Amino acid sequence: MTTTPANAAAPAIEARGLTKTYGKKTVVDHLTFQVHTGRVTGFLGPNGAGKSTTMRLLLGLERPDSGTALIHGKPYASLSAPLSHVGALLEAKAFHKGRSARNHLVALAQSQALPLTRVDEVLDVVGLHDVAKQRAGAYSLGMAQRLGIAAALLGDPRIVLLDEPVNGLDPEGVFWIRNLMKKLAAQGRAVLVSSHLMNEMAVTADHLLVIGKGRLLADCTTAEFIERHTDPAVYAATPAVARPALLEEAFMRLTASAVEYAAR
Amino acid sequence: MTTATIVRPEHSAVRPTHRPGFSDLTRSEWTKIKTLRSTWWSLAAMIVLSVGFSVIACIITTHDYPTLDAATRAEFHQDTIGLILQPGEGFASLAVCVLGVLLITSEYSTGMIRATTLAAPKRTSALLAKAAALAGLVFVVSELVAIPAFFIGSAITGKYASTSITDPIDLRSILAFGVYMTGISLIALSIGALVRHTAAGISIMLALQFVLAGVLTLIPGSFGQHLSNALPLGADVIVSSGHNAQNIYTPLQGLLILLAWVVVLGGAALATVKRRDV
């Protein structure tokens, strides 16, 4: 079958020396990392650290100046039926405002030779079934985000990339996305989610990739990250159940010198 | 989390029914075109206005026939088919220019282009599929202009001239109307893909189609005439008998001019889309 990974042993996502510059500014600087299945990997960094650019490089929307980005060992652009490998939510409103949600998903499904019954399935999963025939341009940000997730899940991909998925969502929406990500990981998928919301990542991510100014600053489990980068005295004094709350402090300490836009 | 906790995905049976190819992309692009209301109202307006203008032009010229001079009468007889079909070109090509540009620039302005590119990361294939869907639609709708315009126009002009659907030149001109509009739509799509901006794309297209010819004829001598007729607009000689005193190029040359524009601009659009980040 053409949609089976070229190399099942290869990591779900792999970046090797990924570098991207805009003019003289290096936005992504020799990034090397792997993202594995069965867990939520949080992709953290201050604003402007290069998170979105890295995701766009992984998806072939931009070309790196050097280095490679691989999906199951192959460049994204060489995948046949790519949406069956990777589902991505990059921006809330990546759809035509005049088209209904259902028709948007039908067009995407047709491009991948997916059965159209799948469109109704994902509409059910994200809870847009009753409004699927409305113009998507009339959707609230939360509904638009759900449509983006429906598109990402359309091909039942083994890898899911979400760029700031909880931005602009109400608490119920945040809760929903958090549980969805955990469920996707528990189903054996690789989930890479970028965010600058520490509390959100502390309760969702099993593993962390932290970047600052385009460079990789940390690649470890969330628990290890907190242990390594918080004040040892504070860490020792904090009960284990409360330690996720220390993520913000750990992150601040690590990225203090790598903040792109800082108030002085 | 360890591999021991992995459970099977709920919808593990969801797989492409076959290896997706160009026909799947074209089907997808066709769904995109047909699910926008703007497509249908602009094409409906195109049919009504274009057929209307052809009919009005036929009525006026036929009514004036007794008072026409010999040269104009000769043209009436030699190129009745051009007289019937060409007056509808203006509105038809206006609608087609806007449709072609918008089809691609609306993807850039809404962010849809990223969804499209993720689904078809080889980029050029998505643009080619879009071109195929657009070409098919524009050809069919243009024939829905040309065929009624021909029969109504023939009935009106029949008082002084004869046209027939079985006449090779008349039939060729009716089909050429669709070919001409299809070519214009592909030029518009290419311009849209190159500039990625709706207002800029439509402005360039309208300048090319409705302004530039007039400007070029201001160049003295036959050079300006030849240049102005080498525009896509001049390629409408294919929608005529070719026996009109105003024509500089033959219908075959007109077809080659149209093809050259489509190939050059389409090639530039494909090369740019392939290279550019989205």
Image: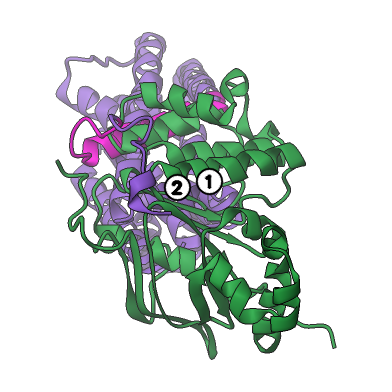
Q: Is residue B60 above or below residue A166?
A: above
Label 1 belongs to which residue?
A: A181
Please tell me if label 1 and label 2 are on a single chain: yes
Q: Amino acid at mark 1?
A: Met
Chain A shade in the render: green
- Residue in view at x 59 percent, y 83 percent: A213
- In the shown orientation, is residue A212 left or right of residue A117? right
Farthest right residue? A264
- Residue in view at x 33 percent, y 36 percent: B8
The x, y position of residue B58, in whole percent, is: 46, 20
The x, y position of residue A142, in whole percent, is: 69, 39
Q: Chain of mark 1?
A: A
Q: Name the disc covering residue A185, or none.
A: 2
Crowd rating for badge 1 (residues with CA inside 10 Å; few <14, some 14–19, many 20+)? many
Q: Name the disc covering residue B226, or none.
A: none
Task: Please give the range of residues in magenta.
Answer: B14-41
The x, y position of residue A115, in whole percent, is: 31, 25
- In the shown orientation, is residue A109 left or right of residue A43? left
Give the SS element for disc 2.
helix
- In the shown orientation, is residue B87 left or right of residue A71? right
**Hey, which quadrant is residue A106 in on the image?**
top left
Residue B28 drawn in magenta: yes
Crowd rating for badge 2 (residues with CA inside 10 Å; few <14, some 14–19, many 20+)? many
The x, y position of residue B19, in whole percent, is: 18, 39
Real-space Cα separation, disc 1 to disc 2, in angstroms = 6 Å
Count the labels in the image.
2
Chain B shade in the render: purple
The answer to whether the residue labelled 1 contacts the one labelled 2, judged by CB atoms less than 8 Å apart, is yes
Q: Amino acid at mark 2?
A: Ala
Magenta: main secondary structure: helix
